[in-house]
DNA sequence: CGAACCGGTTGTAAAACCGGTTCGGTGCGTTACT
């Protein structure tokens, strides 16, 4: 089969981007495939074109509702109507309708949580699944253990679906992520296509700053001088908002905060404004990023240190997708690592809380009649958050061990292990930040990802020596991109769907 | 660690000050359905 012809036929492109053809060929030959392609190389085309060339349905597991929405829209823009996102956005009637005619769709998007439902799983089982896709597959190891446990159950779900042909897609190519991915999906034999995590056009720099006050002033200075647009990352919602206001008071107008505590409407608005160049700076938490396809981000500043080098790499990787010169700047003050340490501990249930829950369960051991009532009681009395409770409940009720005591001990072991892993990751981030490894930052970060630095790079990092003014702009361009042309945009959509596939 | 908040103190009225405590980041689902 000539893949270029098919590409032309279905998407009207003439050439593949790096990696796409190899991945698609591997799938079409019937191999489970792991593809770790750099950001912005068109990962979704890998499953879209494969889907067209295979018989049956493509199931795509996606971590965010907004991401599903983007991808379904993208497919529809390309003239594909047989696409559905099975999620909580659907009204009851729509949902029932969709589920009763699942086989009429080609592309079905789902969250991992949806697969928990036996009903959904049964319906999916009735299909001829051509391809099972895990998009943003690094979520398995980044979120599976203590945030969204259903990510770790993807292997089970996959087995229940009869181990269909599988494609895992991500841009975070660490050996560890890969290992955990393979283990949790129960892959035995697979092809992998793995590209370097290095982004040569992004200069890496860390600035040591004595105090928080100095850091605040330095941030204003940087944002005033650096060529935008840019993202500033914070580890607290309050700080992100506070600094967005502070920047506004200091003459930077087109800046907004973005974090998970804001309502959906505002989040979409701000994201759209940033994408269409109506904002220069976003003061964000880690909520901002996944699915952001903006080519010309010129800098990413970290006001706080991320919790691990994987997150750091993902966040700075949002800069310079157009291949042009960009900079990642981390501002470090002594003691900054305390915040990530605190976050790591707060995420997991404490020993005291677990003991408390255990004792209460033991007392009631033989008198559990109303589980929902008991659950509410346990949550409110122990003071566990929703996430903490889910971790605990997963072990205390969903575990195969015989006795409650065994499950309680396993839970404690698990939490200790997770804490140690998290602390270790923070330490590695810290060591890199403080340059205790000495020498080139790029070399050191690549070493962490088990890669060698093979090429010499101009303006590589602060350790190699850089001139920050290269990234400054003398003439700030404050004119917005001409207001977005929705009319034209719509005409294009209509034209494409008319042309048909 | 730093920020925000709370309660008590001060010394007679209100606001400033102190010390102690708490908190901090990511998102799906939520019924019942063929």
Image: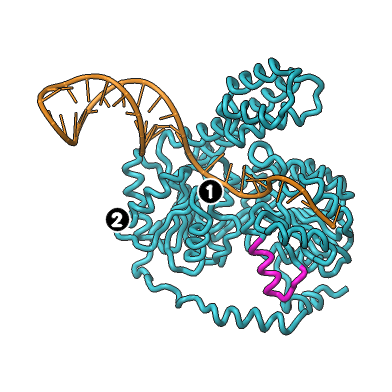
Chain colours: A cyan, B orange
**Figure quadrant of residue A322:** bottom right
Horizontal and vertical percent position of residue A51 = 81, 66
Q: Which residue is mark 2?
A: A249
Quarter of the image where the C terminus of chain A is located: bottom right
Q: Residue at x 51, y 57 (%)?
A: A267
Sequence-wise, the earlier of marks 2 and 1 is: 2
Q: SS at mark 2?
A: helix
Horizontal and vertical percent position of residue A348 = 60, 31
Q: Are marks 2 and 1 in contact (CB under 8 Å)?
A: no
Horizontal and vertical percent position of residue A412 = 67, 23
**Figure quadrant of residue A385:** top right
Between residues A405 and A92, which one lies in front from this camera angle?
A92
Q: Is residue A254 magenta?
A: no
Which SS does the magenta portion mostly show? helix
Q: Which residue is mark 1?
A: A286
Whether A105 is drawn above or below A401: the answer is: below
Q: Which chain is indicated by disc 2?
A: A
């Amino acid at each position: 089969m000539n893949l270029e012809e098919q590409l032309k036929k279905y998407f009207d492109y003439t050439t593949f981007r790096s990696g796409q053809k190899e991945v698609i060929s591997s799938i079409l030959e019937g191999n489970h495939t792991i593809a770790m392609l750099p950001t912005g190389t068109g990962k979704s085309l890998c499953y879209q074109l494969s889907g067209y060339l295979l018989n049956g349905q493509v199931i795509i597991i996606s971590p965010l509702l907004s991401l599903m929405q983007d991808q379904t829209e993208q497919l529809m823009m390309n003239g594909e109507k047989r696409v559905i996102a099975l999620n909580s956005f659907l009204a009851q009637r729509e949902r029932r309708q969709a589920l009763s005619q699942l086989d009429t769709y080609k592309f079905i998007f789902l969250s991992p949580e949806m697969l928990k439902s036996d009903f959904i799983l049964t319906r999916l089982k009735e299909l001829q699944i051509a391809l099972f896709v895990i998009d943003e597959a690094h979520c398995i190891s980044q979120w599976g253990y203590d945030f969204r446990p259903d990510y770790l159950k993807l292997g089970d779900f996959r087995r229940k679906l009869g181990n269909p042909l599988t494609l895992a897609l991500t841009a975070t190519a660490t050996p560890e992520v890969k290992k955990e991915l393979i283990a949790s999906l129960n892959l035995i034999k697979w092809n992998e296509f793995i590209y370097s995590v290095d982004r040569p056009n992004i200069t890496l720099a860390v600035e040591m700053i004595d105090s928080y006050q100095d850091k605040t002033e330095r941030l204003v200075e940087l944002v005033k001088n650096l060529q935008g647009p840019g993202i500033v990352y914070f580890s607290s919602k309050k700080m992100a908002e506070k600094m967005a206001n502070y920047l506004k008071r200091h003459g930077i107008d087109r800046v907004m905060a973005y974090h998970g505590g804001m309502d959906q409407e505002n989040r979409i608005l701000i994201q759209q404004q940033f994408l269409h160049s109506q904002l220069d700076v976003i003061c964000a938490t880690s909520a901002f990023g996944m699915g952001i396809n903006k080519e010309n981000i010129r800098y990413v500043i970290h006001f706080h240190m991320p919790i691990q080098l994987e997150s750091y790499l993902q966040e700075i990787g949002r800069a310079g997708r157009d291949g042009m010169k960009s900079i990642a700047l981390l501002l470090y003050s002594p003691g900054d690592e305390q915040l990530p340490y605190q976050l790591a501990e707060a995420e997991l249930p404490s020993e005291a809380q677990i003991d408390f829950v255990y004792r209460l369960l033991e007392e009631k051991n033989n008198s559990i009649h109303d589980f929902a009532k008991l659950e509410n009681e346990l949550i409110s009395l122990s003071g566990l958050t929703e996430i903490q409770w889910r971790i605990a409940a997963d072990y205390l009720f969903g575990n195969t061990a015989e006795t409650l005591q065994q499950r309680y001990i396993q839970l404690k072991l698990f939490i200790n292990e997770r804490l140690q892993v998290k602390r270790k990751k923070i330490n590695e981030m810290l060591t890199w930040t403080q340059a205790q490894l000495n020498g080139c930052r790029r070399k050191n970060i690549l070493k962490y990802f088990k890669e060698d630095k093979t090429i010499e790079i101009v303006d590589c990092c602060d350790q190699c020596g850089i001139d920050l003014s290269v990234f400054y702009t003398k003439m700030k361009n404050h004119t917005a991109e001409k207001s977005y042309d929705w009319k034209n945009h719509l005409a294009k959509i209509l034209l494409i769907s008319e042309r048909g596939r």
